[in-house]
Amino acid sequence: MSFASNRVAQLETAYNNASSAGVVGIISVTVDGVATQFSSLAELYDEYLKWKSRAARENGTRPRVSQIYLGGIR
């Protein structure tokens, strides 16, 4: 499992735990010795989305272009 995939799993677990517990303070996540602290759930979720995209790119499951609309009739 790559670093990005590990990071996604840890961030997802931390987000689920923090949101269900109603954590308001600092949230800390450590993956492979790299510790990161977040001050809010929104900040944690943004980081999760960034790493999820990076992991999908590494695994080859993220499309390069999801949709192109050049105008005209749909």
Image (cartoon, helix red, strand yellow):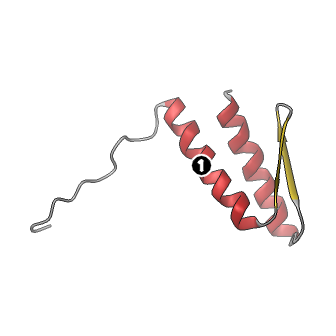
The quarter of the picture where the N terminus appears is top right
Residue 16 to residue 2: above or below: below
Quadrant in which residue 30 is drawn: top right
- Location of residue 2 with respect to 20 vertically, above or below: above
User: What residue lies at 70% left-to-right and 66% top-to-bottom?
Assistant: 42
Residue 53 lies, in percent from the top left, at 54, 45
The picture quadrant where one finds residue 40 is bottom right
Check the image and name the residue furthest to the top.
1
- Residue 63: where, in percent of width, then height? 38, 41
The quadrant the C terminus occupies is: bottom left
Q: Residue 31 placed where, x, y %?
A: 81, 37
Q: Which residue shows up at 86% across the image and 58% down it?
A: 27
Task: State the residue at coordinates (50%, 35%).
Answer: 57
Q: Is residue 43 left or right of residue 61?
A: right
**How packed is label 1: few (under 14 Cα within 10 Å), some, or many (20 or more)?**
few
Location of mark 1 (residue) = 50
**Mark 1, secondary structure of its residue:** helix
- Looking at the image, residue 73 sits to the left or right of residue 23; the answer is left
Q: Is residue 41 above or below residue 64?
A: below
Look at 56% across and 39% down and name the residue there: 54
Disc tally is 1
Kindly give the residue lying farthest to the left in the view shown: 72
Does 74 sit above or below residue 65?
below
Q: Is residue 53 left or right of residue 44?
A: left
Q: Amino acid at mark 1?
A: Lys
Q: In the drawing, does residue 55 fall left or right of residue 9?
A: left
